[in-house]
Image: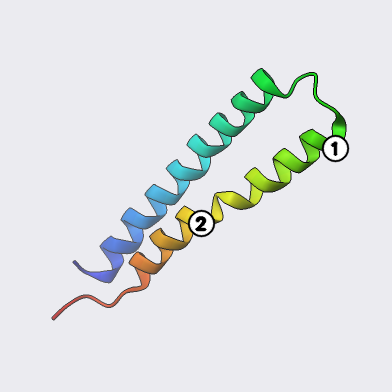
């Protein structure tokens, strides 16, 4: 697969990942952490704010791989 198409697909996947992840993380927080202490909410959003990087790393590494000849 050409690099340009892989990058296009990767960008679409990353955008979808960020949007879906943000919606689910926020929905979970509003359902279960609404009455929690402020430090619990801060810790939750700190962890979930960094956790989306893990799947994004796999998509970016796939995008950067050279095509097989």
Q: Residue furthest bottom?
A: 69
Q: Nearer the viewer, residue 66 or 36?
A: 36
Residue found at x 78% / y 34%: 41
Q: Which label's residue is closer to the chain start, 1 or 2?
A: 1
Q: Is residue 51 above or below residue 25?
A: below
Q: Is residue 23 above or below residue 48?
A: above
Task: State the SS at label 1.
Answer: helix
Per the model, the C-alpha gap separating discs 1 and 2 is: 24 Å
Give how far across and how far down residue 35 sits, in percent. 80, 19
Residue picked out by circle 2: 54
Residue 33 image-quadrant placement: top right
Quadrant (top left, top right, bottom left, bottom right) of the C terminus: bottom left
Residue picked out by circle 1: 39
- Of badges 1 and 2, the one in the foreground is 1
Give how far across and how far down residue 5 sits, in percent. 26, 61
Q: Residue furthest left?
A: 69
Say whether marks 1 and 2 touch (CB < 8 Å). Answer: no
Residue found at x 54% / y 30%: 24
């Amino acid at each position: 697969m050409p690099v340009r198409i892989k990058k296009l697909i990767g960008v679409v996947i990353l955008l979808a990942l960020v949007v879906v992840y943000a919606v689910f993380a926020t929905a979970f927080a509003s359902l279960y952490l609404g009455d929690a202490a402020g430090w619990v909410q801060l810790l939750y959003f700190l962890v979930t704010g960094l956790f989306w990087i893990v799947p994004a790393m796999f998509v970016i590494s796939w995008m950067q791989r050279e095509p097989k000849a």
